[in-house]
Image (cartoon, rainbow, N blue to C red):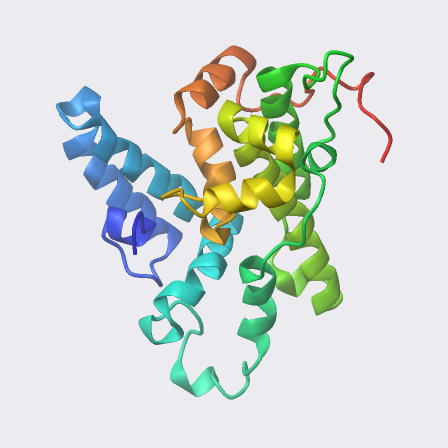
Amino acid sequence: MADDPYDALRVAHKASAAEVRAAYNAMAARFHPDNGGSDPANWQRIQRAYDTLIDRDSRDAYDAAAAGEVGEEEGWWGDDDEDDEDDEGSGDEERQPWECELEPFDLLAALELRRGDDGEIVGRETRIRACFHKLSTRLRPWPWEAYPDAAAHAEAVRDYRRVCLAFLALRDPARRNIYASCGYGALRASEAYQEASVFEPAAQARSRADFFAGVDEADREWLLMNGSDRADDGFEEERPAR
């Protein structure tokens, strides 16, 4: 599977957090630019993999999104064979909200954005990133066992995925123009020709980890300017009510 974080760090799918950290430290000693690493793209892949796997929620989100591609026989789900009978059905309940196709929705509303009199998003890229920074943290789902039922978990995952998809689409000027001019359906159709579609569940699952890792140069610059732990997005007075 492309960009598999387990493959990037060369750890098993059941690796513990300590094993993930140890693998990352070993690779940092060899491949980090400060230690003589000569391939920045490779180091970014390693860093992105670590950020995904060391965070429990990001790892669960990646596993859920990837499960449909790799298949259960490769060990994405379940701990031991003897537990399969007791856990029958639970994996489907956890994975399905991450894998299902999202119904069309208002991308601007998902990120709590609005247009100005000139038709442009108020705050533009700065606000798009600021709102994603706050909402992706606020709405990131808990593990599915924390919810009273499958419906509550599915709703939380749907709201989070909407924020991620909206961010991936609106931060890119070309995609933003397609959406503004022709709507959701046209954006969806145009993404069919893209190698990395924002409508892919795996892309949505990676979006927050990639953002905080600064994989995209513009995201990295925003984080350096505003701080990765910033609590206030600076737009409270302009934010429309839910």
Q: Is residue 140 visible?
A: no
Q: What is the x, y in percent for residue 35?
A: 16, 24
Q: What is the x, y in percent for residue 88?
A: 54, 83
Residue at point 83%, 16% (across, down): 237
In-front residue for pair 189/15: 189
Quadrant housing residue 162: top right
Which quadrant would the N terminus be assigned to in this image?
A: bottom left
Relative side of 143 to 194, left or right: right
In-front residue for pair 162/21: 162
Q: What is the x, y in percent for residue 72?
A: 39, 73
Relative side of 91 to 130, left or right: left
User: Does 83 appear above or below 135?
Assistant: below
Which quadrant would the C terminus be assigned to in this image?
A: top right
Residue at point 17%, 28% (across, down): 39
Q: Is residue 184 visible?
A: yes
User: Does 201 appear above or below 218?
Assistant: below
In-front residue for pair 133/217: 217
